[in-house]
Image (spheres, rainbow, N blue to C red):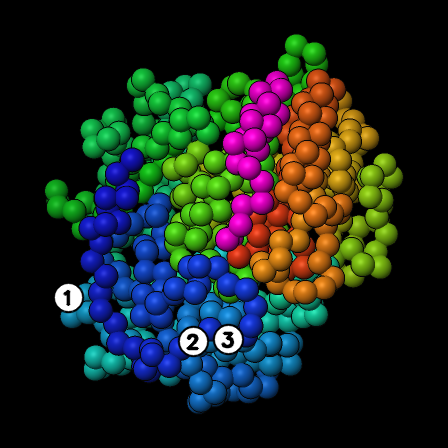
Amino acid sequence: MNITKTFAALTIAAVAVSCNQTEWKPVGDRIMTEWGENLDPENVLQEYPRPQMVREDWANLNGMWNYAITAADAEDSECADGKILVPFAVESALSGVGRAVTEEDALWYERTFTVPSDWKGDRIILHFGAVDWHAQVYVDGSFAGEHKGGYAPFSFDITDLLKKGRKHTLKLKVLDSTNKSWQPRGKQILNPNGIWYTAVTGIWQTVWMEPVPASHVKSYLANADIDKGELKVSVDAALEDGDICNVVLLDDGNVVASGEGSEVVLAVPEMKLWSPADPHLYDIEISVVRDGQTVDQVKGYTAMRKVSYGKDDKGFYRIHLNNKPIFQFGTLDQGWWPDGLYTAPTDEALLFDIEMTKNMGFNMIRKHVKVEPARWYWHCDRLGMLVWQDMPNTFDNEGRPWNYHGIDVVAEVEVMDQEGKDNFYNEWGEIVRANMGFPCIVTWVPFNEAWGQFDTKEVAAFTRSLDDTRLINAASGGNFYSDCVGEIHDLHNYPDPVLYLYDPTRVNVLGEYGGIGWPVEGHLWQNDQNWGYIQYKSAEEVLQTYETYGLQLESLADYGFSSAIYTQITDVEGEVNGLMTYDRKVVKLDIDRLRHINTIVINSL
């Protein structure tokens, strides 16, 4: 896979910063990661943000911006409150601000930038990795567009808004109600407690821009059919008359297959399949060609792999990867950081959790009610880590009836009005479409434990209409249906693994268990109210209990369990049930012993 070499060759265009960067420092007195402690504000998350569709010319707009917090109905702001380090949420320590934003507030951003002279004649596209939640964007005083949703990338063509001159002004207004409305927000809450964490508002992924010609590739999707030995590539491109798309599949620099058109089916001889044991990736190049000359080109990657399910010789439904049963054993991964909240301090930090999960012997991660930057999924792709991707929930389950063991079908959320439902479909659709090209993702999870659950059958059908290549776990841990909504029947049980309800028509999994707590002094987010589902005072006690649960899982695989997810990879705020501390400075358990136990579980099939 040569995309790393491509990244190394990128030329990052210089941009003007509108303030003195040396003014920045983290705020607050909470614990921090080593990456946060050593963060350079002049070199923040400079890696190329879109690994599946790389262009050589681009400009990173991360860094120091001006900011202000005003009343929500303010029509403008001078952004005179101070400086904020983008892309860290305003509530985080690494933002340099550490202020809360409520539904009555508006958060404003402003900075200047320049367009490199060699971009002249191209269209200028402004990209936002993610902004939580309602972003209104202005360029040189003109409205560029708006976006509602905290978890999907969006962009605007700002070419026609750029006034003459080299220096331009970019301004944002952001509104965020967090848990005061129906907007999807995951574990965020304005009053953090228990399993609910500090709210996140504003820009929390990389802001960047790139030049593209008028005729260019907008996006593509590559779907493998390993049974036929084919790869179907669908290209969405803005093409002028006579221009064509050219698709080339490569393996270690050698051309495997090529074709022309917006819909191309490539024969892939001697396929190398992608799996956790051998995560083989193919390079892909897509070009817009005019009279034999390349007008635009993007470079990315794909994989030959298949996700399905079927019965074994005992009659149990099992998850299959590449037509073979595989026990998927992973960790619940909240994706939170003590210093950056939603945003990892560096790309090295982003990679660290995945590498540690792999080293511990797991083969899967459940990304829990959060969506990560594209680079996180790229790291999973190249390391061979399977991913279950959750939809961030709207409401929680407080004051709403549901049965923990799911034996009774209970009422779905009645407080979700039509505007909230429409927004859910819009945001979930954006999330799926933005991430369905990553081979690592093998399961979509629209709902968790009845939090904001509504129209389950319709949402599952909507998910299937977007992507028919993966499994759907429609209701993880609650609100089960007897008429097979999705392919997976998902139980939650704390602390030990228990198969308390079996569905003979679907794959049976343990979507959450464990939560073995151990507070490590000197590495705690808070001094009191720390908790786990059970709690011990030493690593040995935790490991012995973890091993007991692992052996129980091995046994339960013989009775139908086909996957399990342990809570969780790190401590998060007041939760001390991580395999690592929240600051990632302490791995609580012996990795070799942990890997041995996990290997036994994975080999249980």
| Of 199 and 183, the residue lying toward us | 199
| Of 152 and 584, the residue lying toward us | 584
Residue occupying image coordinates x 21% and y 29% = 255
Distance between the alpha carbons at the discs numbered 2 and 3: 6 Å
Q: How far across and down, in percent of the image, does residue 199 sit?
A: 61, 67
Going from N to C along the chain, the mark reached first, 2 or 1, is 2
Can you tell which mark lies on residue 27? Answer: 3
Q: Which residue is mark 1?
A: 118
> Neighbour class for label 1 at 10 Å: few (<14), some, many (≥20)?
few
Can you tell which mark lies on residue 25? Answer: 2
Residue occupying image coordinates x 45% and y 81% = 67
Q: Is residue 518 left or right of residue 306?
A: right
* Part of the protein shown in magenta: 584-605
C-beta proximity under 8 Å, tags 3 and 1: no
The vertical placement of 115 against 394, above or below, is below
Is residue 82 shown in magenta?
no
Three-letter code for the amino acid on which mark 3 is drawn: Val
Three-letter code for the amino acid on which mark 1 is drawn: Asp
Residue 427 seen in the figure: no
The vertical placement of 602 against 51, above or below, is above
Say what secondary structure mark 2 lies in: loop
Distance between the alpha carbons at the discs numbered 3 and 1: 39 Å
Say what secondary structure mark 1 lies in: helix
As drawn, which residue projects farthest toward the left? Answer: 292
Residue occupying image coordinates x 29% and y 35% = 1
